[in-house]
Image (cartoon, helix red, strand yellow):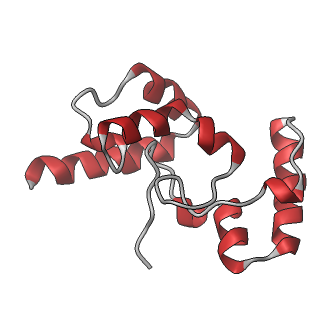
């Protein structure tokens, strides 16, 4: 299966909300809601756990709808931020401090775009 990469470099295929949605698995939705509530300190309900991928049409997890990084990439017509001439912007640098793996993914994509 090809990796589905979000604007910021997260791999949508690995996301629990994406997995639960694609499998239509209410048990996984419930477990994900409980897990994310416990680690992020923000209340999530089973009904919140729906997503078809950050940059795809369809359902989005609540935060994804308002994510400034995602909205910027969409406005500019990019699949992900590695395509942007301003890469990496200040918002992305701050985000990647907490999710360094996403930065590595975008850095790798950036190299691929530069060689093509």
Query: Where residue 110 sits: x, y (%)?
Result: 24, 45
Q: Nearer the viewer, residue 19 or 114?
A: 19
| Quarter assignment of residue 89 | top left
Residue depicted at 13% across the width and 46% down the height: 114
49 on left or right of 30: left
Quarter of the image with the N terminus is bottom left
Q: How many numbered marks, from 0 up?
A: 0
Query: Where residue 67 sits: x, y (%)?
Result: 57, 35
Query: Where residue 58 sits: x, y (%)?
Result: 57, 61
Residue depicted at 71% across the width and 45% down the height: 62
Q: Residue furthest left?
A: 116
Query: Where residue 25 sits: x, y (%)?
Result: 79, 76
Residue depicted at 34% across the width and 51% down the height: 79
Quarter of the image with the C terminus is bottom left
23 on left or right of 34: left
| Quarter assignment of residue 26 | bottom right
């Amino acid at each position: 299966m090809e990796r589905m990469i979000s604007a910021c470099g997260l791999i949508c295929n690995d996301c629990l909300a994406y997995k639960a949605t694609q499998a239509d698995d209410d048990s996984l939705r419930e477990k994900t809601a409980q897990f994310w509530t416990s680690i992020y300190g923000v209340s999530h309900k089973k009904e919140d756990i729906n997503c078809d991928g950050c940059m795809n049409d369809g359902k989005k997890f609540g935060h994804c709808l308002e994510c400034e990084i995602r909205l910027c990439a969409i406005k500019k017509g990019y699949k992900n931020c590695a395509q942007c001439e301003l890469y990496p912007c200040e918002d992305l640098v701050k985000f990647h401090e907490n999710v360094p793996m996403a930065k590595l993914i975008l850095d790798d994509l950036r190299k691929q775009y530069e060689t093509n």
